[in-house]
Amino acid sequence: MFYRENGQFKTTYQSDQQIFAIPQDRWAILAIIAFAFIGIPLLVDEYLFRAILIPFLILSLAAVGVNILVGYCGQITLGAGASMAVGAYAAYNFLIRIDGMPALAAILLGGVVAAAAGIVFGAPSLRVRGLYLAVATLAAQFFWDWAFLRVKWFTNNASSGSVSVADINLLGWTISSPTDKYLFCLGILVVFSLAAKNLVRGAIGRQWMAIRDMDVAATVIGIRPMYAKLSAFAVSSFYLGVAGALWGFVHLGSWEPAAFSIDRSFQLLFMVIIGGMGAIAGSFFGAAFIVVLPIFLNQMLALVGGWFGVEVSIALVSHIEIMVFGALIVFFLIVEPHGIARLWSTGREKLRLWPFPH
Amino acid sequence: MAFFIETLLGGLMSGMLYSLVALGFVLIYKASGVFNFAQGAMVLFAALSMARFSEWIPEWLGMDNLFMANLLAIVVSALVMLAVAWLIEYLVLRHLVNQEGATLLMATLGIGYFLDGVGQTIFGSDIYKIDVGMPKEPVMMLESVFEGGILINKEDFVAAFIAAMLVLALTIFFQKTATGRALRAVADDHQAAQSIGIPLGRIWVIVWCVAGLTALVAGIIWGSKLGAQFSLSTVALRALPVVILGGLTSVPGAILGGLIIGVGEKLSEVYLGPYVGGGIEIWFAYMLALVFLLFRPQGLFGEKIIDRV
């Protein structure tokens, strides 16, 4: 009743080509963004910012990056964590080696460097595909893990690759409180997701999808696989690099290579697959799920242990946590292999017809 | 020269151990098209169960015979692995038939997390010893040929021998038995196999069981080398380049790939490592596999990939 397109006529090309063509969508998105910018800072306390909201925003950005590559271009990557690491350490180097480098510029340049690295390590995708490619991208993961641990130049001779940065200053706005950090990440996320949404519906996005659906057929109709695949790697790595730099600069403050280990890559891939491949919105659902789940499980286990009067040790909690985490992921994949985004779109279809389903 | 040969032999033997883990990947991928990321977790699970049962069984039965304890522990662990394999197939993969590769990959990753958690919840998370009487002391060989001789770890030697026997047994199983023939038929073409009356479900259970038992052998050998501990589950990551180098669908490929990777790793670490700061083993294996893939995208012995629109 509320979500219906009847009677909405597009009279100009411009209105036909909007990102969100249906006014209800447009208003809903605007309302969500407005709420995120104005409402949440008024309602939420510091712990929630630090433990959930900031990680959620940054990992959503990373998940959008992975989704571009895996969901839209069909190239499975297990090296996402490495791209984040490259972004973080490159941004760090720009910041400390060039005097007066603005932090935001350093973060974006970190993304550019990550994109370059992504192109190099994405090159095997021209020869191999599918699972072979997935394993090949692990090469990037292990190589960069090693490089940031052993090559002292990258970390400015810090021992064990741990580096730290001071609070970011953006045009006189010092980003130090959790609320500031949240708003900063949110701003970047909104800009980048709108850009991604635009990219994937443009010419290049269609090329990616053609390559994903069948690369030989795409080549036959005149899509250059090299250009399409490598551009997907570059864009995805750029997003991941920016997310990595944010993760280091804003969320952690000081970090070491282990922050971007292979577990991070798996985590990002989980987000995309549980959230929904080939849907930008899916990245957000997936990131929310993966960020909130461990915290929720942790609290639940302590609570359940309390009911039975059993003192659950921390080690046991962490084991049960990964156990339940694994089981839930499998359960989710069995119940809805296409991810939460599919549930969302089915729900929307239902809503369009409601209350007259025929 | 002696040092070079020593390194080479060391590489060959650790390569044999990689092949052992790689075999588990290949077996399952060949028969069901699932790339089983949980193989490492299965190895860990098997090693933990072996270590703990060989500790618990003498306690329960009040006996004091190491050999009997180990034998019983192996039998019990084998049963446990069979149960695990059956449960994975029955509860998870049966419901995911015909899904995309990435989804299946993630499902096995989830299984891996689950097994890691369960294993450590039940069996504990310390480092446990597995003592199946593998000889520990190194021996010198060929002292007449080289000055100083070649130092060889007897343990590695025994492990490599067991790995070779396992491969032989698997080859015979695949080539000579009716079940093996059915397995190969399924690997070749699911639909055709089904149409001539081969029960797919049962075949998949069998494959997972075989992979579970391979994991047990790998777990015992790796466990007695490194101790049964969490880091065993990362052994699978070391074995991945082996699998893609050899080809995902080829048992001989897993063996040869293992040997190449093992030797490459050791030689690179010894001769190249000092120049770049050491610790290059892990990514060097991947780079080696990557270079191979650029020339043969399907791996050494993998089935040729034919593209059709």
Image (tube, coloured by chain):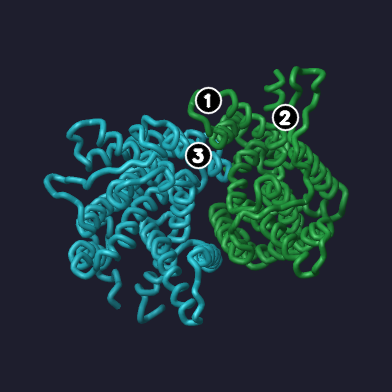
Q: Position of residue A285 (x, y in %)?
A: 38, 62
In the rendered structure, the residue with mark 3 lies on which chain? A
Q: Which image quadrant: the C terminus of chain A?
A: bottom left
Give the residue number, with chain letter if any, for mark 1: B274
Q: Which chain is cyan?
A: A
Q: Nearer the viewer, mark 3 or mark 1?
A: 1
Q: Residues within 10 Å of mark 3 (few under 14, many from 20)?
A: many
Give the residue number, with chain letter if any, for mark 3: A142
Q: Are marks 2 and 1 in contact (CB under 8 Å)?
A: no
Q: Colour of chain B?
A: green
Q: Amino acid at mark 2?
A: Leu
Element type where label 1 sits in the image: helix
Q: Is residue A227 something one can see in this rendering?
A: no
Q: Are marks 3 and 1 in contact (CB under 8 Å)?
A: no
Q: Which image quadrant: the N terminus of chain A?
A: bottom left
Element type where label 2 sits in the image: helix
Q: Along the polypeptide, which appears first: circle 2 or circle 1?
A: 2
Q: Amino acid at mark 3?
A: Phe
In the rendered structure, the residue with mark 2 lies on which chain? B
Q: Residues within 10 Å of mark 2 (few under 14, many from 20)?
A: many
The disc at residue B9 is 2
